[in-house]
Image (cartoon, rainbow, N blue to C red):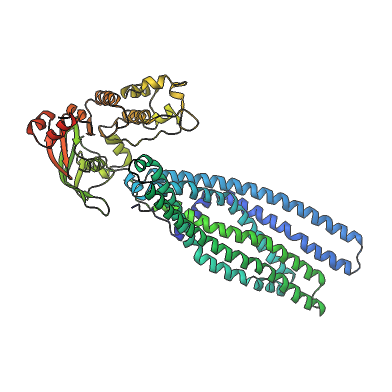
């Protein structure tokens, strides 16, 4: 079962938002200032229209009307220009802030321990880095500036109504009470509903990714119906949670639409009665009515953006939640005194499972080539993960040079121990880009040497642009064996003192695999190599062989010693040779 990554609390989201605003405070202040000026320019029209009505009723001529109409035209043009400028500045602010969010997300994701990502599932992290970051980006680019503009307009409009006639302003505010109740009802339910929808989206991404990556296994074991049923259950949960947020919107928006009319009706009734008694001019009533009619548009935008803010707020909480996930060990951990690896009485069990390792003791000497063999489920891969510092033992210790491997900071760990599995990745970019990830300072000679060490220099030289050939989508596609050779070449460039190979050559054909392993052994002469061996020729070439059975280390010695001992390894060796 996957365990989702944490979600930030509302107070943490607010703090994160304030940090983003402070990071570009001048632009944010400019957006507020320009929006305020645009809103102020927009107030002139209704007020002057009321003046025109009163002046005409008082008997003034066409000249007054033309003069005031010219002012209205100039103010409308000023409002248009200021609003466009405000949107431009707001969108630039949003794009810069989105870049910070994305960079911070990538930095946090890369600092997550591999074990945390595996337990959470790649679907959760992928959904946060794609759908959630996109929603946050749209809000920063579009909803944020629009909300600021609309808030400024609404405040200025209400203020103008109070200036014209405080009583009419009070009527307008009282008429908006219905919106307040509808908004409170919606906000109490929206965050929980949108978070649940985001979790369901992560689950859908996870099950689709797992099914796609394991398609061959699904077909081989005839698991299609089970996977389809599981996918349908996940999709149904997602549908139900999306329907919940749709229900909230379908209740909220009609209630708000009705509430827009109430202030206008109230002002017309009260203002009309006061005008009939001579207590208020017709121009004041018309101006106040026009202002409140104008208020519908910014209020509509505000409430629309509030609805989007609930969705983006939930997405931002999921993105910001990575800050609360367990982190890799920070820099400054002790430096190992040597390269010796000691495994002492190690026990380990996965969540909701029994013990996988049950008291393993092992010492790996510097420069030794050790093969770890045993039947499937014996604990070989688990041991390799502990040796690589991906997981920490439940009890006992795994140390390098006297320092617990799991306590090393990422940079130190990468220079000490590197685990290479059959899982690999080709990054978008050139062959050179894929190699420089391991050692950014490497020159072309070092890159070619690394490729030659794993037998990949031949096919790379045949590429149209050699090291500068684009790989991945839009470029040259690489099959599994070539991708794995690139991964091994990165290991050569990383130059660790201990290399753990867990089926690292599984995707290569036997001849290429043996050539690659021998080439690596030659390059890593003097370094420690721990191979989780499924092909026993690897064990034959090793200095020592460790035999794992049911979570225990049952045999340890050279190939010849273990064959002569007629134990578990000898039986495996005879089976491998078909005896």
Q: Nearer the viewer, residue 118 or 246?
A: 246
Determine the residue located farthest toward the bottom in the rendered image.
277
Q: Is residue 312 left or right of residue 550?
A: right
The image quadrant of residue 184 is bottom right
Q: Nearer the viewer, residue 55 or 434?
A: 434
Q: Residue at x 29, y 33 (%)?
A: 504
Q: Across the whole image, how many numbered discs are drawn on residues?
A: 0
> Please, is residue 263 above or below residue 409 in the view?
below
Q: Residue at x 33, y 44 (%)?
A: 114
Q: Nearer the viewer, residue 510 or 473?
A: 510
The image quadrant of residue 370 is top left
Q: Quadrant of the C terminus?
A: top left
Residue 449 at x, y percent in the picture: 34, 21
Q: Residue at x 68, y 51 (%)?
A: 83
Residue 561 at x, y percent in the picture: 9, 30
Q: Residue at x 80, y 76 (%)?
A: 275
Q: Is residue 248 left or right of residue 569?
A: right
Residue 455 at x, y percent in the picture: 33, 22
In this view of the protein, can residue 474 be seen by the observer?
yes
In this view of the protein, can residue 317 be seen by the observer?
no
> Please, is residue 143 above or below residue 577 in the view?
below
Residue 420 at x, y percent in the picture: 30, 35
């Amino acid at each position: 079962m996957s365990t989702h990554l944490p979600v930030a609390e509302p107070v943490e989201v607010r703090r994160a938002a304030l940090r983003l605003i402070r990071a570009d405070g001048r632009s944010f202040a400019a957006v507020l200032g320009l929006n305020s000026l645009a809103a102020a320019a927009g107030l002139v029209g209704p007020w002057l229209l009321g003046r025109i009505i009163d002046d005409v009723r008082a008997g003034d001529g066409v000249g007054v009307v033309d003069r005031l109409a010219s002012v209205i035209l100039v103010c409308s043009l000023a409002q248009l220009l200021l609003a466009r400028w405000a949107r431009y500045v707001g969108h630039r602010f949003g794009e810069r802030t989105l870049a910070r969010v994305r960079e911070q997300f990538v930095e946090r994701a890369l600092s997550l321990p591999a074990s945390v990502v595996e337990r959470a599932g790649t679907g959760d992290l992928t959904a946060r880095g794609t759908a959630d970051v996109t929603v946050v980006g749209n809000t920063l680019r579009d909803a944020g500036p629009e909300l600021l503009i609309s808030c400024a307009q609404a405040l200025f409009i209400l203020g103008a109504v109070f200036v014209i006639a405080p009583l009419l302003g009070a009527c307008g505010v009282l008429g908006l009470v219905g919106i307040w109740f509808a908004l409170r009802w919606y906000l109490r339910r929206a965050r929980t509903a949108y978070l649940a929808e985001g979790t369901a989206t992560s689950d859908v991404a996870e099950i689709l990714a797992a099914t796609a990556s394991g398609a061959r296994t699904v077909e081989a074991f005839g698991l299609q119906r089970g996977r389809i049923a599981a996918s349908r259950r996940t999709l149904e949960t997602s549908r139900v949670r999306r329907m919940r947020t749709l229900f909230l919107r379908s209740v909220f928006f009609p209630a708000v639409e009705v509430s827009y009319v109430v202030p206008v009706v109230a002002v017309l009734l009260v203002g009309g009665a006061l005008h009939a008694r001579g207590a208020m001019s017709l121009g004041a009533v018309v101006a106040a009515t026009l202002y409140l009619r104008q208020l519908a548009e910014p209020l509509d935008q505000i409430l629309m953006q509030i609805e989007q803010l609930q969705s983006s707020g939930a997405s931002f909480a999921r993105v910001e939640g990575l800050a609360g996930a367990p982190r890799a060990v920070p820099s400054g951990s002790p430096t190992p005194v040597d390269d010796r690896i000691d495994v002492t009485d190690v026990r380990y069990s996965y969540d909701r499972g029994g013990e996988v390792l049950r008291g393993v003791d092992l010492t790996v000497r510097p420069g030794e080539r050790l093969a770890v063999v045993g039947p499937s489920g014996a604990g070989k891969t688990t041991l390799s993960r502990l040796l690589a510092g991906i997981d920490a033992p439940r009890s006992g210790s795994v140390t390098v040079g006297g320092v617990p491997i799991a306590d090393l900071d990422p940079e130190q760990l990468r220079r000490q121990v590197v685990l290479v599995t059959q899982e690999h990745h080709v990054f978008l970019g050139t062959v050179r880009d894929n190699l420089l990830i391991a050692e950014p300072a490497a020159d072309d000679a070092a890159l070619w040497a690394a490729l030659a060490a794993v037998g990949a220099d031949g096919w790379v030289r045949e590429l149209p642009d050699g090291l500068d050939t684009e790989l991945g989508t839009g470029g040259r596609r690489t099959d599994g064996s070539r991708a794995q050779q690139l991964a091994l070449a990165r290991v050569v460039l990383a130059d660790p003192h201990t290399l753990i190979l867990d089926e690292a050559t599984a995707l290569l054909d036997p001849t290429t695999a043996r050539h690659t392993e021998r080439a690596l052994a030659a390059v890593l002469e003097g370094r420690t190599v721990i191979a989780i061996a499924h092909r026993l020729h690897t064990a034959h070439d090793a200095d020592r062989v460790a035999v794992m059975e049911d979570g225990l280390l049952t045999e340890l010695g050279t190939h010849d010693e273990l064959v002569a001992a007629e134990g578990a390894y000898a039986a495996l060796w005879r089976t491998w040779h078909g005896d």
